[in-house]
Image: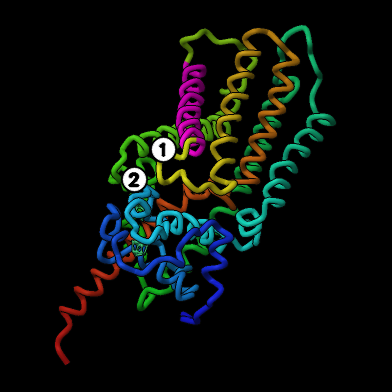
Amino acid sequence: MSTRVEPDLLPALKAYGAAGAEQCLNCGNCTAICPLSTTGNPFPRDCIRLAQVGLRDRLRSSLDPWLCYYCGECSSTCPRGAEPGETMMAVRRWLTAQYDWTGLARRLQTSRGWVWASLLFPVLLILLLATFFHGPVITERVALNTFAPVELIHQLDLILAGMIAFFLFSNLYRMHRLAMSREPGTGIPFSLYLREAWRLAYHFLTQARFSRCESRRRWLSHLVLVGGYVTMFLLIVVFLSWFQTDELYPLYHPQRWVGYLAALAILYGAGDALWGRLHKRHQMHRFSHPGDWLFPLLLVLMAVSGLSIHVFRYQGWPMATYLTYVAHLALMLSLYVCVGPMGKWSHLAYRPFAVYLQAVKEAARARQGAATQLAPAG
Ligand code: SF4
Ligand code: SF4
């Protein structure tokens, strides 16, 4: 791997939100205070140093930025005001662009024009589709599945999910290539990948590392948000024909309660994130990139529009139901285009994948160390 020095690296990271990294004197206070840093992964100091000296390829292959959960403790204690937590956040955005082979992530992370276009284009597309391809508009009663046939919407959902999966998995593959390329020997046995695979599901579902940060309330809020989001994603992509019905169920029916709980969880978690960013009381909310606002904002709007459709349906208001449904679809598409696999949403996959790859690396090193010790002296 190249160790070419690129003096433009730090200025480039500023476009992704790095603030103050040039002030760092490498004292190491931040690494000492970080609850997640280890001897083998002394972040955030290491990452800042790589950025300062312009070791682009070393930074590109680092998993450390994903092992940080932005508790902000390092920034609060930095004697130089170098904002190490925010630098880690900026490096995560930069890495998202490095993994992405289309070049879209870089544009979406660094250009407001592209952010606006990625928000508005899906809205126009959905308006166009809804205008020309909607089903019969029945106004005597609510007939949502006549206006927007559930089979058709389900097929579109599956196509969208397939596209998201394609971009996400191809970027994960590139992340893997970059992260493992620095490993000596590079011949990590497949059995080690299998042995550590449980970490992927475990860290995706629990974000257990986050719970080691000082504020467990933030971990809990994030956990609730992810739980609500994953439930809603499954309802829409896998169980849509069960979820989108014209039948009015009684209050105790599971279809209603699963939907309510998922929507409330999203409202609580995403609302909490927006509230924090508005009031900037916590270190991690002092700096905000467009994606930091848009992701929770779009989630809140989607939950509100989803609940509104439900209320209008039960009230028997056909036009309000249909129009809100179109708005709901537009918000959903905007979310996946603007902050989806190219944006903030992708950290849902990159974080657990980084924890997994880090565990594989450590297991491979331990195995290699044991083999070296057992080898007869020559
Ligand atoms: S970011 Fe701050 S605390 Fe961390 S090494 Fe640099 S000067 Fe020290
Ligand atoms: S923000 Fe928190 S987890 Fe991230 S490097 Fe700083 S102290 Fe560590």
The residue that appears at 50% across and 59% down in the rendered structure is 18
Choose the circle earlier in sequence order: 1 or 2.
Answer: 2
Q: Give the position of the C terminus as an image quadrant.
A: bottom left
Q: What amino acid type is highlighted by mark number 1?
A: His
The residue that appears at 67% across and 36% down in the rendered structure is 155
What colour scheme does the image use?
rainbow
Does the segment drawn in magenta span residue 269?
Answer: yes
From this view, report whether residue 39 is shown above or below residue 205: below
Q: CA distance from mark 1 to mark 2?
A: 9 Å
For the residue labelled by badge 2, is the local secondary structure a helix, a strand or a loop? Answer: helix
For residue 82, side relative to residue 32 (left or right):
right
Residues shaded magenta? 254-278
From the image, tell me which residue sits under label 2. Answer: 210
Q: What amino acid type is highlighted by mark number 2?
A: Phe
Q: Position of residue 158 (x, y in %)?
A: 63, 39
Is residue 191 visible from the viewing direction of this image? Answer: no
Tell whether label 2 touches label 1 (CB within 8 Å).
Answer: yes
Q: Position of residue 353 (x, y in %)?
A: 42, 54
